[in-house]
Image (cartoon, grey):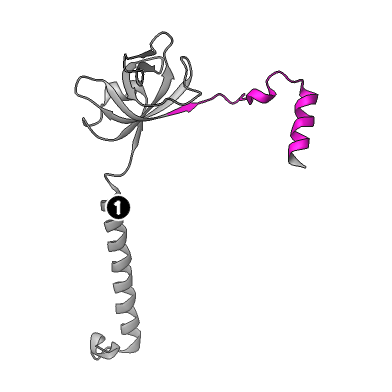
């Protein structure tokens, strides 16, 4: 099919207009198709108070962020199932995770748990991301003076 057959007996000015409209429609359709394909892939982020006020659908993949409450961390008899509570100062959500926890995962630290909410209100985490504070210091540099730290950093960057 040639270009003239597609646009019939239109003038060149009108042919360009028709092609521009078709291109615009194609771009909009591609955007709508991409958004529709990704709508279930988005992982929404909740804090405990938001999760209690407006819980996600049961079984839907979401992220839960907050602080691991002191005294809530326990390990099941299998040694790989962890139970703890994530709080934000206003609400608390019980979490269960089976697997190896990150090194920085401790009570009182920040955590982002990826998983889904069960009907009993327990969040089942598939993955844990432990957060450290902005004053993070590598173990190798903890007991050094500021001058020793500067010297060590300078030696490693040369």
- Residue 152 horizontal/vertical position (percent): 76, 31
- Residue 62 horizontal/vertical position (percent): 32, 33
- Residue 127 horizontal/vertical position (percent): 37, 31
Kindly identify the residue that appears in the image at 69 percent across and 24 percent down. 141
User: Would you place residue 100 above or below residue 2 in this image?
Assistant: above
Instruction: Classify mark 1: helix, strand or loop.
Output: helix
Residue 143 within the magenta-colored segment of the rendering? yes
Image quarter in which the N terminus is found = bottom left
User: Would you place residue 7 above or below residue 28 in this image?
Assistant: below
| Res. 12 image quadrant | bottom left
User: Would you place residue 19 above or below residue 125 in this image?
Assistant: below
Crowd class of label 1 (few under 14; some 14 to 19; many from 20; radius 10 Å):
few
Q: Is residue 81 left or right of residue 142?
A: left
Kindly identify the residue that appears in the image at 31 percent across and 89 percent down. 11
Image quarter in which the C terminus is found = top right
Kindly identify the residue that appears in the image at 75 percent across and 27 percent down. 149
| Res. 99 image quadrant | top left
Residue 72 within the magenta-colored segment of the rendering? no
Q: Which residue is nearer to you in this view: 42 or 103?
A: 103
Q: Which residues are magenta?
A: 129-156
Q: Residue furthest top?
A: 71
Q: Which residue is nearer to you in this view: 69 or 98?
A: 98
Residue where numbered disc 1 is placed: 35
| Res. 91 image quadrant | top left
Q: Is residue 153 left or right of residue 103?
A: right
């Amino acid at each position: 099919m040639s270009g003239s057959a597609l646009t019939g007996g239109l003038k060149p000015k009108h042919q360009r207009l028709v092609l521009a409209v078709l291109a615009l429609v194609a771009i909009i359709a591609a955007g709508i198709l991409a958004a529709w394909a990704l709508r279930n892939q988005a992982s929404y982020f909740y804090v405990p108070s938001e999760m209690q006020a407006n819980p996600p659908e049961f079984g839907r993949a979401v992220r839960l962020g907050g602080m691991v409450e002191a005294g809530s961390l326990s390990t099941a008899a299998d040694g790989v199932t962890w139970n703890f509570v994530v709080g934000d100062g206003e609400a608390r959500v019980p979490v269960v995770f089976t697997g190896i926890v990150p090194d920085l995962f401790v009570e009182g630290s920040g955590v982002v748990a990826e998983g889904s909410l069960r009907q009993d209100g327990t969040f089942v985490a598939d993955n844990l991301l432990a957060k450290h504070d902005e004053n993070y210091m590598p173990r190798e540099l903890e007991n050094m003076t500021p001058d020793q730290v500067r010297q060590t950093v300078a030696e490693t960057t040369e």
